[in-house]
């Protein structure tokens, strides 16, 4: 694997939005409407959103960089959980949220996601997190298997708004 992992910069915002447009739909339940997916991309994963994330001192985006082409990314949010459903089930505090973990489909099955996950967990630990948590759609069996293989355990559930639809996610946590 030729990719390197590095911390994203504001210069990556456009490339991150392009990558998100390819990868986010893959994590959605099969019945998700294209309109709901597009609404989420525009509301949460646009270039301007990524510029804002990158300007926030509590957010770190790690990227897999293949000679200037981004092939994967994670977003780590080092803030207390504000969702009461999440806050009620977390036990490893302080905790960092693994808000996004996506790899371009052309790089699936090549170890890229595992490498990115290891770097993300190490980063959270280096910044003082006792645990890392994430939300994953209950229908995304492939992602759930990956997170369990990475050491995460299901600890609860939460709601996630995808466009006009309310989805149901598992909350998964890993103690560092």
Image (spheres, grey):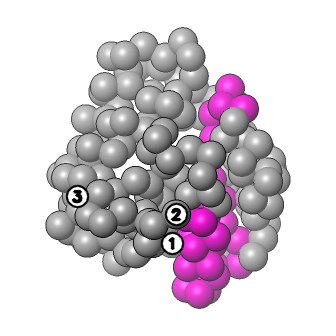
Residue assigned mark 2: 1
SS label for mark 3: helix
Contact? badges 2 and 3 (CB < 8 Å)? no
Q: Residue 2 location, x and y as percent?
A: 45, 66
What's the magenta region? 115-141
Q: Residue 160 location, x and y as percent?
A: 54, 34
Near mark 2 (Cα within 10 A), the count class, few <14, some 14-19 or many ≥20, is: few
Q: Quadrant of residue 56?
A: bottom left
Q: Quadrant of residue 168?
A: top right
Q: Residue at x 78, y 70 (%)?
A: 175
Q: Is residue 92 above or below residue 69?
A: below
SS label for mark 1: loop
* Mark 2 or mark 3: whose residue is earlier in sequence: 2
Q: Quadrant of residue 111?
A: bottom right
Residue assigned mark 1: 78
Q: Residue at x 56, y 70 (%)?
A: 120
**The stretch drawn in magenta includes residue 118:** yes
């Amino acid at each position: 694997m030729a990719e390197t992992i590095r911390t994203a910069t504001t210069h990556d915002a456009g490339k991150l939005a392009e990558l998100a447009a390819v990868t986010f739909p893959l994590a959605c339940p099969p019945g998700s409407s294209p309109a709901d997916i597009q609404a989420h991309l525009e509301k949460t994963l646009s270039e301007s959103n990524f510029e804002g994330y990158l300007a926030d001192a509590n957010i770190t985006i790690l990227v897999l960089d293949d000679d200037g082409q981004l092939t994967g990314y994670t977003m780590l949010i080092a803030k207390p959980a504000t969702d009461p459903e999440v806050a009620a089930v977390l036990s490893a505090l302080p905790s960092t949220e693994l808000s996004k973990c996506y790899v371009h489909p052309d790089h699936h099955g090549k170890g890229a996601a595992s490498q990115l996950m290891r770097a993300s967990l190490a980063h959270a630990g280096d910044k003082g997190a006792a645990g890392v948590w994430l939300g994953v759609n209950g229908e995304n069996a492939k992602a759930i298997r990956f997170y369990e293989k990475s050491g995460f355990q299901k600890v609860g559930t939460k709601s996630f708004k995808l466009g006009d639809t309310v989805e149901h996610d598992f909350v998964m946590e890993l103690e560092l």
